[in-house]
Image (tube, grey):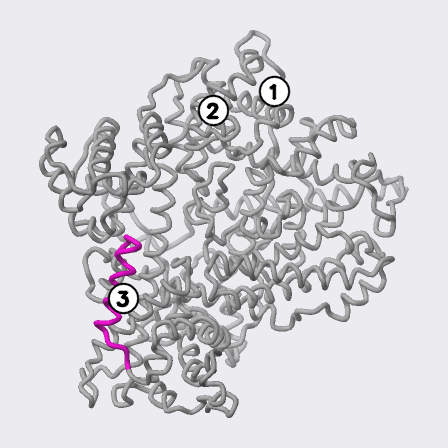
Amino acid sequence: MPPKKRCNGIQLNKEIKQTNNRRVSPVKQENLEFNEDRHKNKDAEFVTLCKKLKVTDSVCDHAWSVWEMMLGSMDSVQETKQYWAACLFIAATDLGMQTFTITDVLKAADLRQKQLFDLLKLMDVNMDTISTKVNTAMNRLEKKYDVLQALFQRFEKTCGKIFMDNISKGKDGIEIKEIVRSCWVLFLLAVGSVLQMEDDLVISFQLLLCVLAFYIKRCPAAILQQPYKTASGGAGQSPATRTSRRNQGRAKPRPPDVDNILIEVLCKENACSGDEVKDVYLNSFTAFLDSMGLSASKDLPKEHELTKQYEELYLKNKDFDARLFLDNDETLQMVKTEVAQSEKTPMKSSQGEQPALIPPQTPVRAAMTSIQQLKVILSSASSQPSDVLELFFKNCTVNPSEEITNRVKHLGQLFSQKFAQTMGQPCVEIGSQRFTLGVRLYYRVMESMLKSEEKRLSVQNFSILLNNSAFHISLLACALEVVMATYGGNTFKNGSACSDGDAGGGISESDLSFPWILDVFQLSAFDFYKVIESFIKAEPSLSRDMIKHLERCEHLVMERIAWRSDSTLFELLRRSQEECLVEQAEPSATLNQPLQHNHTAADLYLSPVRPSSRTTPPDFHTSPPLPASCPSASQSKSISLSLFYRKVYRLAYLRLNTLCSRLLKDQADLEPVMWTLLQHTLQYEYELMKDRHLDQLMMSAMYAICKVKNIDLRFKTIVTAYKSLPNTNQETFKRVLIREGQYDSIIVFYNLVFMQKLKTNILQYASPRPPTLSPIPQIPCSPYKYPNSPLRVPGSNNVYISPLKNRMSPSVMTPRSKILVSIGESFGTSDKFQKINQMVSSTDWSLKRSFEDGSAPKHLKRLKFDTDGLDEADGSKSSGESKLIQKLAEMNSTRTRMQEQKLRESAQSVKKEEA
């Protein structure tokens, strides 16, 4: 039953671990001189590459071992030198002995940055040798490159608007090219000084605008274009006050010189919040200028001095040289992609006019648009409870107002402190601003929830709910997660979010992505899950992307975070078994029933088991809290536990079904057996989930059933298919908890843990009388309604209606959205409505053309496929409808007749009953 040990990669990783355990400071212990005689058994060109990069003997040996293993795992290897470079990066990172920069490697092997990332990913797919440490370094490096590449594109575009393009020098002889280079290098220094995480797009972009404002203010007016020439004239600059002059000689720094008008112009041109950029300038950028000795100077910094300082930073970090963006260096170039034809507007506004192009949604523009949309939602919200909320608080048996206010204040201080620790101390004020946005959303959603509960239950006293600390912290955490995700962009990139050390994570501690907020508030993931669905339903203005983000957070909780060893979930499961309050967390008989999504946060936090329709609902809002040890208190949590398990079951089956459809198409009968084993494990052996991942048990169940059924399905095949699924992380199968403090691959987990625990149960499936199969869970549609999703018109085949979006001010629209919206324009005469009706009701969509030019309808050309397989446009057969259209019309007519017949029969039965 155990899989054959074909795991050279695992043995290699063990060697690395042993080496790491013995080593205290490898760089200091080992002689950094390269001993060429020691490597005569290796390829001469490989040794030459090692000498060029000045690697140590240990790195050379380890890189060659990786190379030899790769040769045995891959069918063919081309571009040998490039693979050698990737092997050296892996070895140096694994051993912590990197003597070269990333740019050194790229130059030595004629590689581009993206090619290196692709090579590392390809090597990982083929031989699974990329360790957690290497994967983390690669992900961080890739994200930093993506951020700087996007910012440089915006930098180039903005500089083109700032500086005159018909002159190369100002009157004082300063070259514009030198100014641009100096500006970019100062920005790189600012990012490296202010941020601990150089891959934060929003703060980095705000710093870029600060640097641009600093340079524009000091540039000769002759080389500036409008509106920057006017804005840099000094209007809006705050004059020195008596207080500031009096304090110049003291230790306190003088008030910063910030040109508000100039920053506002820059922000307007770049669709960015002026207030946020000013705050970054005051609280972060000014301190950086002080450290550089540039605050008091009115002159432009010298490029060679900035370059020297950046050279030191670059060599220290050992990453890529971002100055090379200025030279269009090959190592940092990306493959250019043309704008897709689908991005063109489908109609011409007038005869002969070329269709307008919709600007591509760049990372910077997408981030700024998301932030603007969030601020539009919160424009009417307050950071204090509204009058409506205050009334709800007063109606409580115990008024929670003071406790809520004190809790928000305490959590705000904690949040800002942790944010600054993660991002860098100059960012403490930025953390405070984001917390304020979260508080405004928190109060707004709380009010919406309470109004909904009031309408549902016809009560106004929510004393227990509003005095429940877990509810408030969870609700505030959810609001802050929305804010953090809005500013952080795609926090689940590469499926590596939510990786913690206990569960085999590979993400750095300095990552703000989920579940960072849970760790900051020390909040139970099981408590957090209870509020997600109600939060989404209570805030209809959330964007589609944000709803998907929260739904993904819920999945992360269910698949791993809630199963941490310190989770309250295990206590609830143990208590439910000991007290026999429910027979099991989720009766298997209910799995094939629809999952009802009608529970609210109040139900999940406080309410007892839902009573039958013949009993009176208990007044759980006014009754006193029950102690945790009380049976009624345990019973009150059975709804949340049962719903949690039902969602876990459905998520687990969905993953299993996806893998089976890819790997076992010809053995469809195995899927129910695998599901039965997995469901049994989750229900009765849930301790196996402690500090592990749901997918680890799922893949182990697949392999176990294939073994007892004599199906040749290897773990490597399962893992390869699993890696192709969305939102997966290689740490799931590379680093699985074996026993306390010890991790290894999923194969070792299966042999030493899973198979040993479930051996008797697994062997039953090979007997003539196997266990009864568990019902297949019904996979429901998402309970979350995505905004602005088109809905099909009942009774039609191709007519959809999209909900009307909230009207946005033109000032917060992007160029992309402005093209699609008509503002201040009347629709037209009634004949346009008639033509639209004709177009919708017609089965021939060529009528759309007649709407444009008023000419007679022309039939669309149809494609005729000849015997040679060539596509030929054929417009000769233009009469009559196609067979497909006729068939659809017949089906529609038949359905209508059946509905009419059913209505007549219902009417006749009613008449008989009345008679």
Q: Quadrant of residue 854?
A: bottom left
Tag of residue 51: none
Label 1: state its secondary structure.
loop
The percent position of residue 90, horizontal first and vertical second, equals 28, 40
Q: Earlier along the polypeptide chain: callout 2 or callout 3?
A: 3
Where does the magenta region start and end?
300-320
What is the magenta segment's predominant secondary structure? helix
Of all residues, the one furthest to the top in this rendering is 768
Residue drawn at (32%, 85%), measured in percent from left and top? 298
Question: In the structure shown, which secondary structural element does the residue marked by tag 2 occupy?
Answer: helix
Give the amino acid at mark 3.
Answer: Gln
Answer few, some or many: residues within 10 Å of disc 2's Cα (few below 14, many 20 plus, some between 14 and 19).
many
Q: Earlier in the sequence, mark 1 or mark 2?
A: 2
Determine whether, in the image, residue 328 is placed left or right of residue 578: left
Magenta segment includes 309: yes
Identify the residue position indicated by label 2 in the image.
749
Are there few (<14), some (14-19), or many (20+) residues within 10 Å of tag 1?
some
Check disc 1 and give the amino acid type: Leu
Q: Quadrant of the N terminus?
A: top left
Residue bearing mark 1: 773
434 on left or right of 107? right
The first of marks 1 and 3 along the sequence is 3
